[in-house]
Amino acid sequence: MCLGVVGQIAAIEGLVATVDFWGTRKKVRLDIVDEPVQVGDYILNHVGFAIRRIPHEEVEETLAFYEELLGASDLLARDLRAELATSDPGG
Amino acid sequence: MDATPRARLPAAPDDEAKKLRFRDPQRARTLTRRLEQLCDAAGRPVSVMHVCGSHEQAIARFGLRSILPPRLNVIMGPGCPVCVTDLPEVDEAIVIAQQGAVVATYGDMLRVPGTVQSLAEAQAEGADVRVVYSPADAVALARQTDRQVVFFATGFETTAVASAAVILAAPPANFSVLSAHKYIPPAMEIVAEMPDTQVEGFLAAGNAATITGWRIFERFVERHGLPVVVGGFEPLDILAALVKLVELVGAGEARVVNAYRRCCTAEGNVPAQRMLWKVFRTMGGQWRGIAHIPNSNIRLRDEYAWVDARKRFDIDLTGLWQSAGPSLVQRCICGNIMAGIARPADCDLFGKECTPETPVGACMVSSEGTCKIWHEYGGFPAVSFAPRPADAQRVGNG
Ligand code: SF4
């Protein structure tokens, strides 16, 4: 889905980051992210690839939006939860 | 800023989604009032189109249509990649799987009807079809086997970049890609030219524009004289983008406005674009139920023939097509819905023969399809402006 999911980088090894999504850790590739990223940064994940680094000043608002979306059981929330539940993309 | 990861997912009752929980209800009211004024000033119905499944999900989820002026018609265009994947593209994947290769694809693709059957039905007959979350998963699968692994790649430019990335990262020799990727800007052109559509402006999706940049829409604006506003996904983002769009429509001003500054720049993600167009090129192709659209299919360049499933396999669809009988798919009007000239309720199968459990058309399969979304949210839910609990401490944002 085009919304993607937001997570925080916990570790980086080459072009693969370990990203924390609300307690679930997954591998995310960094081949196409728009800016250099480091541990602690938040990124937008789309099909296992980070497509954008979330600027610091927007992290709070972005997380609040996602938490609100996830806080229901409708289609959008199910989609997001399914994304969080899927397995790691190969590193 | 909170630097520690948030450990738990929030839980909330189901009916919470029915309330319009704006970050700033006051600002939402101001925006809807402004929209009403603009529509009154126009003195006629105004139709605008968005081209993104996530926009439609957010519009339906937050019940936005119920607070928009009745004369403002917000249509979902061809913004669901699964829904526009053409029947023969599904057929190609099936024929490849029937030849004994492993076909890996995104979960939503499984139940999308082809001319004769879906990948799920082919799987039930013994074809090896696997669901992957990422093209990187498909490559990992290929590394674990000697068999041919074909990634059936669907999605728009944002997703195509991920396919390009795995192709550029030296995948194993038994890996190949069957590209059904599609490119949105040419589809906007076709829809804008359709005589019955009467769309007066487009709301472009923020995340695709994160990759392509908003300047990509300038040529479209020049050619068609229609405004384009790039918008985000929060209810306030959407309302603000609609206000801007209707302002432009009212003023007869055709230009691109970026209402999603925090996400989208003029040029976009240039290295990602380079990767995309290094591996792929555009060519004409059919969008399911809509039209043959020039330059709208993203296909592998000749230099990447070595990873192109269409070159590696002998794909003859005639054998499959000979077994095609008359099916309900023929009565599906998804194409008209995505072209903005029909609504799901206009389809006599909607909610009867065609439901999310027994989908007839692709728009009922994908969670980004208009029919599935409308079925889920039941059209126009009754909503009210409700402050979020956190709003008490939150100052209205800009
Ligand atoms: S309700 Fe089903 S058959 Fe009718 S247009 Fe929608 S997807 Fe197609």
Image (spheres, rainbow, N blue to C red):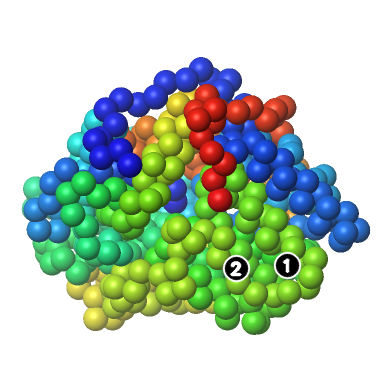
Q: Residues within 10 Å of mark 2 (few under 14, many from 20)?
A: many
Question: Which label sits on residue B30?
Answer: none
Which numbered dot is residue B257?
Answer: 2
**Residue B9 x/y as whole percent:** 35, 26
User: Which of B290 and B117 lies nearest the eye of the viewer?
Assistant: B290
| Quadrant (top left/top right/bottom left/bottom right) for the N terminus of chain B | top left
Residue drawn 70% across the image and 75% down it = B254
Q: Does the closest atom of ligand 1 sit within 8 Å of the Cβ of label 1?
A: no
C-alpha separation, residue under disc 2 versus residue under disc 1: 9 Å
Q: Residue at x 39, y 60 (%)?
A: B158
Amino acid found under the numbered disc labelled 1: Leu
| Left or right, B282 with reference to B386 | left
Instruction: Locate residue B213: give its quadrant.
Output: bottom left
Q: Which residue shows up at 35% across the image and 63% down it?
A: B160
Residue B109 x %, y %: 41, 46
Looking at the picture, which amino acid does disc 2 mark?
Val
Q: Height in image: B50 above or below B388?
A: below
Residue contact at pointers 2 and 1, CB within 8 angstroms: yes
Quarter occupied by residue A62 = top left
Protein chain holding label 1:
B
Q: From the viewer's side, name the closer residue of B299 and A39.
A: A39
Seen at 44% across and 68% down, the residue is B265
- Residue B302 on image: x %, y %: 28, 81
Where's residue B257, x and y in %? Answer: 60, 68
Give the labeled residue for mark 1.
B248
Closer-to-camera residue (B323/B158): B158
Question: Does residue B367 show up?
Answer: yes
Horizontal arrangement in the rendering, residue A79 relative to residue A30 (left or right): right
Residue B351 visible here: no
